[in-house]
Amino acid sequence: MTTTKSCMIKPAWTPMTIGLMVLGFVVFWPLGLAMLAYILWGDRFGGMARDARDQWRASPLKGAFDDMTNSAVYARTGNLAFDDYRDRELKRLEEERAKLDAMRAQFDEFLTELRRAKDQEEFDRFMANRNRRPNGDDMTGDMAPA
């Protein structure tokens, strides 16, 4: 028996599984319920996973999903007129997207410049107010220099 097999939690009523089930119910009740299901039916899960995997491999949907993931995003349909139209429209949409991205960058640059101008105006106003104050009056209040 390998080390990993001996360290696995067996689906049986052992102190370890009971403790994990109680802990699961305390932390989050679906975890406790899942542990209870594992204790009761865990010996069947290995076979169920193997059966599900075999059924998926034999399914016609698996071939369709494999074809979708292995082919290009927009596979040719066989209708040349439609494929040409779709290619033109996709190219047009990409150009529109590039224009919108450029406009967004210009707008962000405008906002940055606007914020800088506003900050400069506020700073200039602060400096003007500060210079108009009498010499003995500063912002620290009673702590005038002696």
Image: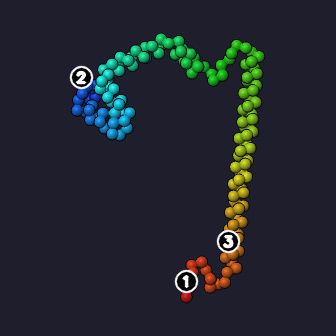
Q: Amino acid at mark 1?
A: Asp
Q: Residue furthest bottom?
A: 146
Per the image, label 1 sits on a secondary structure element best described as loop
Classify mark 3: residues with Cα within 10 Å, few (<14), some (14-19) or many (20+).
Answer: few
Residue highlighted by disc 1: 142
Q: CA distance from mark 3 to mark 1?
A: 21 Å
- Which residue does the image show at 36% across and 33% down from the upper left? 31
Q: CA distance from mark 2 to mark 3?
A: 79 Å
Residue highlighted by disc 2: 1
- Residue 10 point in image, percent of width and height: 27, 26
First reached walking from the N terminus: tag 2 or tag 1:
2
Mark 2 or 1, which is nearer the eye?
1
In the image, taking residue 134 as reference, residue 88 lies left or right, namely right
Location of the C terminus by quadrant is bottom right
First reached walking from the N terminus: tag 2 or tag 3:
2
- Which residue does the image show at 68% across and 17% down from the upper left? 76
Residue highlighted by disc 3: 126
Per the image, label 3 sits on a secondary structure element best described as helix
Q: Amino acid at mark 3?
A: Phe
Figure colour scheme: rainbow
Classify mark 2: residues with Cα within 10 Å, few (<14), some (14-19) or many (20+).
Answer: few
- Which residue does the image show at 29% across and 36% down from the upper left? 22
Mark 2 or 3, which is nearer the eye?
3
- Asked if residue 67 is positioned above or below residue 99 in the image, the reply reads above
- Residue 15 point in image, percent of width and height: 22, 32
Query: Which corner quadrant of the image does residue 81 belong to?
Result: top right
Mark 3 or 1, which is nearer the eye?
1
The answer to whether the residue labelled 3 contacts the one labelled 1, judged by CB atoms less than 8 Å apart, is: no
Classify mark 1: residues with Cα within 10 Å, few (<14), some (14-19) or many (20+).
Answer: few
